Amino acid sequence: MDREKGTAFNENSPRYMCCCNSIHVKTGTLIIAVLAVIGLVLNFVYYAVVRSHSINLASSIGSLVIGGAVVACVFYALRAQRAAFLLPYMILQVVGIFFSIGLIILCTFALAGAEFPQTVLKQALGEEKISPDIKTYSIILIVSFAINIALALWFLWVVYKCFVFFRDQANFAINNTTNVGYTVNVSPITYKRQT
């Protein structure tokens, strides 16, 4: 546990910094949450306006609701300084990373000439006839999903560091409240800090 002068929790410890030790993990997580809100809105507008099919609109509304709930949990975690509310975002990021890895594998098989992935990609891209550019699409998708995975891993790392910060802060508060005459039996993950 980082302590400054033996009695206070050191919030500015380098282990709670991100982006080359230039910003605190709470600020980094706030930036990620704002970017997630912008991404959700842009995704909804794209599928509601540009590709306005009932199936796309329904899936867009579903992703807006799920993503909105997850981002709301992140904002609440930042406001209340509770680590447990960062878990839904981290879980959704891990699921998204595995989904992107699966799509990279699918695109790799399409690039190799397998028929099934080409059919799936053509349906996903909205092309009915056979296109010779399916290999070009596959390469573009592989690169874009690889970039997506890199960003998702970075965001996951920053939010995890914020999770550790809130957990350590709660541990410090719990361990320093034992002088009231009884032992506090609280989990540091679900601990709500009194301000």
Image (cartoon, helix red, strand yellow):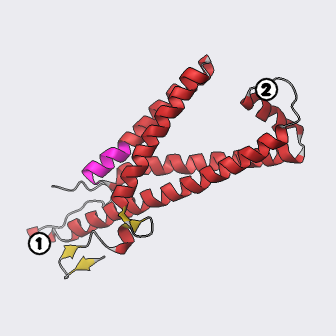
Q: Position of residue 46 (x, y in %)?
A: 56, 28
Dot 2 corresponds to which residue?
127
What's the residue at 66%, 48% (across, down)? 145
Q: Amino acid at mark 2?
A: Glu
In this rendering, does residue 58 appear at all?
no
**What span is colored magenta in the figure?**
73-81
Dot 1 corresponds to which residue?
179
What's the residue at 77%, 47% (across, down)? 139
Name of the residue lying farthest toward the top = 54
Q: Main secondary structure of the magenta part?
A: helix
Q: Position of residue 149 (x, y in %)?
A: 61, 53
Q: Amino acid at mark 1?
A: Asn
> Which label sits on residue 86?
none
* Residue 66 sits above or below residue 181 on the image: above
Q: Is residue 14 left or right of residue 195?
A: right
The mark nearer the N terminus, 1 or 2, is 2
